[in-house]
Image (tube, rainbow, N blue to C red):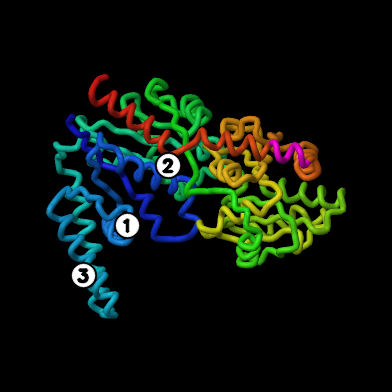
Amino acid sequence: MKKIIMLYDATVVCNILTKNSSRSGIFFVAYNVLLGLLKREEFDIYLYADNVAKLQLVIDTYAEFQKCKIYKFSPMDNLILLVVRFRLDCNKKNFLFLSFLLGFILSILKKVNKFFLNFIKINDLDVYFSPMKAAPAFIAKQKHIKKYTILHDTIPLINDYRNNAEKHEWYHKLIKSINGDDKYFANSLNTKQDFIEYVHSINPANIYVIPLSTGKSYFKIENINYINQIKRKYGIPTDKKYIFSLCNLDPRKNLIFALKNFLTFVEKNNLGNFIFVLGGSSFKDFNDCLNKSIENFGYKKDKILRIGYVEDEDMSALYSGAEMFVFPSLYEGFGIPVLEAMKCGLPVICSNTTSLPEVIGDCGIQINPYSDKELIDAMEKMYFDREFREECIKKGFERSKLFSWKKCVDVITDEITKDFFNV
């Protein structure tokens, strides 16, 4: 059978080079979908990225990508990659002036290449697949190439406070590019319904729902000594019980609501040894917002612990050592952290909004993310009713098996091959 020649946009996969908030849920989707597609015999995959130098560095550095091929659109690409390799060698040998000169040459080559790409024709590509962005102009105008894009959420369309033109330039380009002919994969039924409601140019029949999974392999850790070792690494007292919450700390995550009610919960029940551990990167002025919002609720630094960015390899231990996971987000396209928690045997309290009910099912407690009473009641139920807590853990383990990257890539592969072979 003829292989389908796919160009995969690996731009966001290049975030693997950094360990910070840029490695968000979208990064892990792009990373894991690419790994899954590379295993499929139906495709011959080439990689594309906005920054070909970064892409080459990813291929050279990470074993899982060392057999990947960069699609060469022009002889200019080969020249760019040659300059990139020379510059890397110069950096290693500390030839700073030569490295600076090569960097200047590289910037000129990139501009020339970008201009040249607007005029090329690409005859041998069958499919362009993007895990995030709109197709670049030189791909979009190629009518023979079938185009597929993963849709993550409609947050910038729904929430005005997020609708920042500069920050979300890529998103607005995506929305403008959406049409009735191209095909799309939504990360939840809720995301599909939102795009149908807010983006009228999309064809509902061309949106397929895919089951996502967790970024890395998450699992329950039983070794208390190891859990305590990781707790000490992040400054978490080993003699304290804790609620764990992980996300980037922007307003839609509703964390002020969670923290405020946590303080009420511990004061009401006199739980001196219980703290709230908050992992993730913060938005600007988060600390000021936190202090101002809950100063009347007896805020104490020893009750709320911000640990910042968490290394991938430490996540399972932090989940496994917690009493519960609280995720009262106002809007999620999918909600990967809820699934991560369930895989680690951590019972979940989350919002009953948007996509989160699709993830949690009946394996935890769903709350109105605006109801103080519902959250406090949920915390009390999860903390004091040990039998109920264990039931949530057991159900969570089973439900988490419904989500895997193999199932996700199977849906993607099936739909593309149906289109391509007219099955």
Q: Is residue 331 left or right of residue 209?
A: right
The magenta stretch spans residue 389: yes
Q: CA distance from mark 2 to mark 1?
A: 31 Å
Quarter of the figure with residue 160: top right
Residue type, label 2: Tyr
**Residue at 76% in and 49% down:** 262
The residue carrying pointer 2 sits among few (fewer than 14), some (14 to 19) or many (20 or more) residues within 10 Å by Cα, namely many
Check disc 2 and report its element: helix, strand or loop: helix
Q: Residue at x 33, y 31 (%)?
A: 413
Q: Does residue 148 show up magenta in the picture?
A: no
Distance between the Cα atoms at labels 3 and 2? 35 Å
Tell me which amino acid carries mark 1. Answer: Ala
Question: How many numbered tags mark residues here?
Answer: 3
Counting from the top left corner in percent of width and height, residue 334 is at 53, 37
Q: Is residue 223 visible?
A: yes
Q: Which SS class for mark 3?
A: helix
Seen as rendered, the residue at the extreme front is 223
Residue 171's label in the rendered image is 2
State the SS at label 1: helix
The region drawn magenta spans: 386-391
- Residue at the extreme left: 75
Which residue is denoted by mark 1 in the rendering? 63
The percent coordinates of residue 380 (x first, y second) are 80, 42
Q: Is residue 343 left or right of residue 149?
A: right
Q: Position of residue 156 (x, y in %)?
A: 51, 40
